[in-house]
Every structure is written in C-alpha cells, then in structure tokens.
Amino acid sequence: MASAIEIESLRKEYRSIRGRTTVAVDGLDLDVPEGGVFGFLGPNGAGKTTTIRCLLGLVAPGAGRVRVLGSEIPRALPSVIRRVGAIVETPALFPRFSGRRNLMILARIDGIGCTSVDAALTRVGLADRADDLVKTYSLGMKQRLGIAAALLKDPAMLLLDEPANGLDPAGIVEVRGLLRSLGAEGRTVFVSSHILSEVQHTADRVAILARGKLVASGPVREVLATRQGSGVLVRLHDQRAGLDALVRAGFEAEPAGTSVRVSIAAEAADRVSRALAEAGLYPIELRPDEVDLETVFLELTKADDVEPAS
Amino acid sequence: MIGLVSSEWLRIRSRRLVKVLAAVALAGIVIALVIGAAQSRRPSADELESARLSAEAARDDCIAQGGFGAVEPGGDVEAFCRQEMNSAVFLGKPPMRLSELPETLRGTAFIAILVGLVIGASAVGASWQTGTITTILTWEPRRLRVAVVRAVVVATAVFMVVVALLGVLILLFWVTTSLRGLTSISEGWPSEVAGVVLRVSMLSAAASVIGGAIAMLGRNTAAALGAVFVYLAVLEGLVRGLRPALGRFLLGDNIATAVIGHEVTFGATTLTPGRAWVVVSIYTLGLAALAAAVFRVRDVH
C-alpha cells in the first residue's frame, strides 16, 4: 500500500526569547498509508499540531524528512497543496465576514466556483447560516466551516487537527460519520485528536504520540492488542459463589467490579460457562475483557520516560 | 497567481474598515465644503472691480519696493508680487476660489496617507491576529507570492479609494465655488490638480505598503501603527534636532516634499521632489522586502 504521509526522524525545537528550548517533536517516524481514516493521538503538548504544521510547511523542521502524497515537503508543497485540505487547531477564519464569504475568499485562490462553496456548506450542514457573520457562529459551527473549507478542494488527503473540538455530542457523531464517509471514498483522512472514543470509532489505524515521540502505531485492533490481557468477564447474581466455583474448577479468577474476571482466551469462554453450570450457577453476562483505546493511551503516555515504538 | 489576486481583492473590498474609513472621509469632505459654502459669498461686479483696482495698485507698489523685502536675493519680485497682491486679498471676506483647490488637495494629504497606513496595517495585521494567515498558507504556500500579492492589492485598493475621494472633493469643490465663490483658474491649474491627486494617492498607497510591512514584521496592527507613530513623532524629531544633516533622509520631510511638489527647505536642508520620491521609495520597498524576507522563513503558528 502506498504511503500518503512519510515522516522520518522529524525533530522540531522551539526557542523562547530567553533561550529556553522546548522539543516539540523528537525524532518522529511515521508512515500513513493512503486511504481510510488515520487517528493521530496524544495528550496536549505531545507534538501533534507541530507535526501537522510541518506537514503543511507552516513550520520548518530542525531535522528529518517529510513527504506528503509522494512529494517532498516543503520543496514540492506548492504542487501538492491543491490535493490537501487542512484544519490546523481551531479553524482560523475572518470573524467579520460571512461563512460563505470566507469560503469564497479561499475558493478563489484555486479558481473554485460558487457551486462548490454551496456544496461544501451543505455537506457540513451550514447552508442556512452561510450568510451570517462567522463571529456569530458557535465553536462547533466554526469547526464545521473549517471542515467545509478543507473539503472545498475535493482533496485526496485531509489533515484535520482536533476537528471535533467544541462540537456537541450530536455534532461529534455527525463529524464522525463525515470522516468515515470521506475515508470510505478513498481519501486519506489524518485526524489528530485527544478525544479517544471519537478516534476509536472512526479510525482504521492510529499512532500515539507522547512528548514528541511515537509510542505506538498500527491498526486500531493491533494497538489495542498490545495492552489487551486475554480474559473474559462474567457477571452473576451471586458474585462470591461464582468466583469460588471458578477457582475450584481450576480457573485463574478474580473480582473485577461487579463481575468476575477469568484469565482465559475469549475463544475458550464456553469452558467457563460449563464450569458455572456444573456448579448450578448461570451467568447474566459473559463477554471478552476488552481494553479500550483510552486505557492503552493512558498507559502509553503516563510513563515518565516514554518508550518509543519499535 | 490570478486566483490569489482575485481572493485578496475580494478580501480587501469586504473589509469593513475600508468602507468605514471611506465613509468617514466622504462625510468629512461634505461637511467641510458645506461649512465653506456657508461662509463663502460670491462678490458683486462692483466689489470685484474695486478689488482688482486695489490689487493692481498694491502690486505696482510691491514691485517698486522690491517685494517689501520678502523676496530672497535673486528671486523673481514681479512673480512674487503678482501672486501675493491678487484681487482676492482685497475682497474683504474672501470667497471660496476654485484656484485654491490644489492647496486644499495638498491639505488632505496627511489624512489620506494616514488612511493608507491604517488600511495597510490592518489588512496584514488582522490576518495574523485572527490566524487566517495559516489558513491562506494551506491554500497558497508560496509565501513570497502571498506577501507581494497582498501588498500590491492593498496598495492598489488604497490608491483607488484616495483617487475616488479626491475626485469627489474636486467635484464638490467645483460645485461649491460655482454657486458661492469664484471659478477663475490659471492655465496650469488642471495639470496642477491632476499632479497633486496623483502624488497624494501614490503616497497613500506607499503608506499602505509601509503599514502592511511593519504589521507583517510585528504580526499585529496596533504594533505597526504604534511603531510608525513612535518613528515619525519621536525618532525623526530627535534626528531633526540632534543631527540636522541627516534631515534629508527623514521619511516625514520627504513625504511632505513629495506632496508639495517643489523644493522645500527644512531648517538647513533643502529637499527636491525628485530626491524625496527616491527616499520614500527606498523606505517603502526596503521595508516591504524586509517583511517579505522575514515572512518567508518564519514559523507560522
């Protein structure tokens, strides 16, 4: 599979006026395949936005190499930028112009007509507020206008920095659906976020960044599997009796909240069910003990010394 | 390139500040001329004849007495006396005269240049303050192109706005003097008027480039306006006071000379219009080049 984004040993430092140096991105290697939704995760200050700025040529890396859609950045950026739609942090728009006027100003740069502007506004659900001043928009509406701006070019790749920021739950679901549909159209959608549930439900692959370093990367299932212990959770009316029965049957079991956690592969859950039945106990619920992205994220990013991904 | 020009043009003509400043300037022109018209009165034929005779007598007296000592050695006494001892001087309450229009236009230069400076600084500063420069660069990453197109578009817009406003001023001035003043003009009047309009408009456009360049360096409108104010009011004042010999390089004096359109003496320094334009151009292009060079390599957040 061809790469939409290739980052090799990217490093970016910022120096304050007082000479203090902050390393924003520290030797980042990342490969984002073409097509689908790629989640770029990390806590605040992890270097996500700086990385996106490097991809867009907005900041100059101190070291490393960046390629977008096969073109070297920043050298070939003018030729590749027409195929890239982007939002960097909160969409920066002219607050005293209407939403439509904002998009028209951008559209004219690439000779895009009014029809495409209207289509983009409709796609993000802003058609009826298109002629209102942006300063009257909520944060969520500004985000949607930013996404509309990014979609104007009909891009092969979208770089979206925290696109769900400020959106209400309905808006988040809407954007999630939009991102999925864009990914399904064959576009590469690179989404940075710290809202993990959003990414887990949207992305095909993820990369997790902590203190400027990559700590995990790959398909969502694989990343989850790195921290996922094999086990099943059993919920019974009598938790104590169930725990005793399972231990007596030779299972490694322990209480886990209102359930009992049994260390066994999920595929062998029928053995747990049989052991309980033999003891005259019947589970209300029996399910694999899955780790969510949030748990993995917190584990990977909490360490004082972040261990880079192999 | 055409797309970027079209985008910048749409942006500048959508800016509320441009419309507000133009409207305020227009209102100022109308109010000033209404006041002028109210205070002016077309003199009767008898009053004009009497003033003409008095002027002739005074002119002869002036020439006979060598310009009353007001003409520098070697100066044209007759020309001085003709200019100073004209009929209007002897009309009691002088009416508005169309022949005074060039002087009135020169008087608008300060405001026009200030308008150009504010529009230029705001057009660039607002992009940094709202962060829209980031958005623009995700559409057109060639920064030099962005900087040049923006400067050219803003300067063109300012030039057109100032020409239009001065055009309105000329039209209303002509109407006012036709109704309540004197419309006699000299042979060179049309070209003088055209020259002043062109010079004031060009200097306003240059001021917009200077304002934009400083806003680009400071990434802020207020910083740009503050820097220009400090430079013109404080720094140039100090240089003028402490190192008068450097006066010929001062932006303020050279702008004034370019507006006036003939040799002007500031203290010990005499500036010529040609040299003044060169100095103003160096300031304008130098600042624009510096701003573009910094913008080209600067990290954009």
Image (cartoon, grey):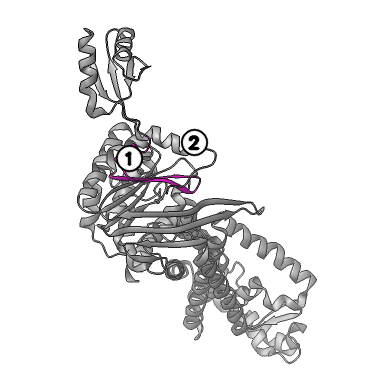
- Give amino acid for label 2: Lys
Q: Which residues are magenta?
A: A204-227
Q: Which residue is mark 1?
A: A199
Q: Label 1, label 2: how many angstroms apart (C-alpha)?
A: 19 Å
Q: With respect to residue A211, does B280 lie above or below?
A: below
Please state the total of marks drawn on the protein image.
Answer: 2
- SS for dot 2: helix
User: Dot 2: within a 10 Å radius of its alpha carbon, few (fewer than 14), some, or many (20 or more) residues?
Assistant: few
Q: Residue at x 37, y 57 (%)?
A: B14
Residue A148: % across, % down:
29, 50
Residue under circle 2?
A302
Q: Where is residue B150, by image quadrant?
A: bottom left
Residue B85 position, x and y percent, is 65, 80
- Residue B144: percent from the left, percent from the top? 46, 70
Q: Is residue A204 above or below residue B51?
A: above
Q: Hey, what amino acid is under mark 1?
A: Val
Q: Is residue A216 magenta?
A: yes
Please give left or right for residue B243 compared with residue A6 in the image: right
Q: Quadrant of the N terminus of chain B?
A: bottom left
Residue shown at 47% from the left, 39% from the top: A301
Camera-side residue of B47 and A17: A17
Residue for point 54% across, 41% down? A305
Q: Chain of mark 2?
A: A
Mark 1 vs mark 2: tell me if same chain. Answer: yes
Q: Is label 1 or label 2 in front? A: 2
Could you classify mark 1 by the number of other residues whose Cα lies within 10 Å: few (under 14), some (14-19), or many (20 or more)? many
